[in-house]
Amino acid sequence: MSNTVTERNRVKRLHERGHYDEATIHAILDVQPFCTVGYVFGGAPYVTPSLQWREGNHIYWHGSSASRMLETCQDAQVCVNVTIYDGMVMARSAFHHSVNYRSVMAFGRAFKVTDAVEKVAKLKTFVDKLYPGRWDILRPVMAKEAKATMMLGLELSEVSAKIRSGPPKDDDEDYALPIWAGVIPLRMQTLPAIDDPKLMAGVVAPEHVRTFKVG
Amino acid sequence: MSNTVTERNRVKRLHERGHYDEATIHAILDVQPFCTVGYVFGGAPYVTPSLQWREGNHIYWHGSSASRMLETCQDAQVCVNVTIYDGMVMARSAFHHSVNYRSVMAFGRAFKVTDAVEKVAKLKTFVDKLYPGRWDILRPVMAKEAKATMMLGLELSEVSAKIRSGPPKDDDEDYALPIWAGVIPLRMQTLPAIDDPKLMAGVVAPEHVRTFKVG
């Protein structure tokens, strides 16, 4: 199923910032693993940070089989938000201050990935998307670990992206004011990796550690 | 009211990572303005990114008076999540891969800041927390702007922090494997500010632009 615009995912405020095409949505999901998952438990809202990855027209996230978030989301309506913060937008009036961002909201019913083989295959995809080639150098997954891992998926069928970029937009008359305005760009920076203090002597960080990027 | 541990904010999974003291919670809220707000609309969950700031024992967020998020959250149960991502934790097995983070979850009923004078005073606090001294150099807020701005608050009375830090924790026998393990530190980086193309000639960025930091 392809993406559909509904009352739920239609961008209402500043609708000119809304996008519904696959290319725009996938480009955000594919560079930002960090997400928040919204769900309802006992009638009240909960938001839990997690990591997502995309395979085709679905996103997935996982965690402990003992996680209340995962347990509650299974077969329930969820809202997954992925946001990349690109900059602080500073205008000549407080009112027009803003943020540059790329954001995706995905709505729908989450489903559980039940098949153990499929679950492990999807974990491999996740690990190798973050760290290309890492899966094959790791100690293999044990059956009890696969069992202790719960994985949920969500079809990308009711999704929107919302993007702001560029300089501030001030009121026409304010451009004549001698007030600094502009953008402070933001990005997630990766610093040089820190070896585990218990690292076996002589083991060096592979390329996927040195080239890791996010956002 | 001080913070209370309830069924809602008690850290269940990996409870040793949970903190409920003011100092730990405030330290996270005060360095990370970016947040996500969870709410329920028509029985379904929604998660909207926003910016929060703290004043004493409350956090606040704001936006357009036409925002459905703000309208729906008013006098309703919300969950506000604030997360700082500190690093990618890479273990010798896929299972023990993790993320270093500092996160706060705040639960409760959001209230609207209705008094116009109070609202503008709180906007000043917000702007000056992000950019010390900026408020007084801006074009003053107009009455119609204050009216077009909706502001919500939440008492910090049902809150938890959850923190992971340090190296990976592998299974004892895996430390003998020649697999690189460690942490890739992450931080939000601010790049040099970009002047608005329409900036008045001769206006230079003030100190609060050059020293801006987040996370």
Image (cartoon, coloured by chain):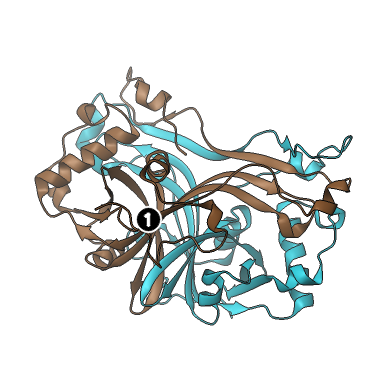
Chain colours: A cyan, B brown
Q: Position of residue A61 (x, y in %)?
A: 61, 66
- Left or right of B154? Residue B36 is right
The residue depicted at 16 percent of the width and 35 percent of the height is: B140
SS at mark 1 in the image:
strand
* Number of disc labels: 1
The residue depicted at 36 percent of the width and 79 percent of the height is: B43
Residue A81 sits above or below residue A31 on the image: below
- Left or right of B183? Residue B156 is left
Q: How dense is the environment of label 1, judged by Cα within 10 Å: few (below 14), some, or many (20 and up)? A: many
Quarter of image, res A203 = top right
Residue B143 sits above or below residue A4 on the image: above
Q: Is residue A57 visible?
A: no
Q: Nearer the viewer, residue B209 or B28?
A: B28
The residue depicted at 53 percent of the width and 66 percent of the height is: A21
Can you identify the residue that label 1 sits on?
B159
Identify which amino acid the numbered label 1 is placed on.
Val
Of all residues, the one furthest to the top in this rendering is B202
Q: Is residue A95 visible?
A: yes
The residue depicted at 37 percent of the width and 55 percent of the height is: B159
Residue A115 sits above or below residue B143 on the image: below
Q: Position of residue B172 (x, y in %)?
A: 80, 52
Q: Position of residue A62 (x, y in %)?
A: 63, 67
Quarter of image, res B38 = bottom left
- Badge 1: chain ID: B
- Left or right of A73? Residue A124 is right
Q: Position of residue A148 (x, y in %)?
A: 69, 70
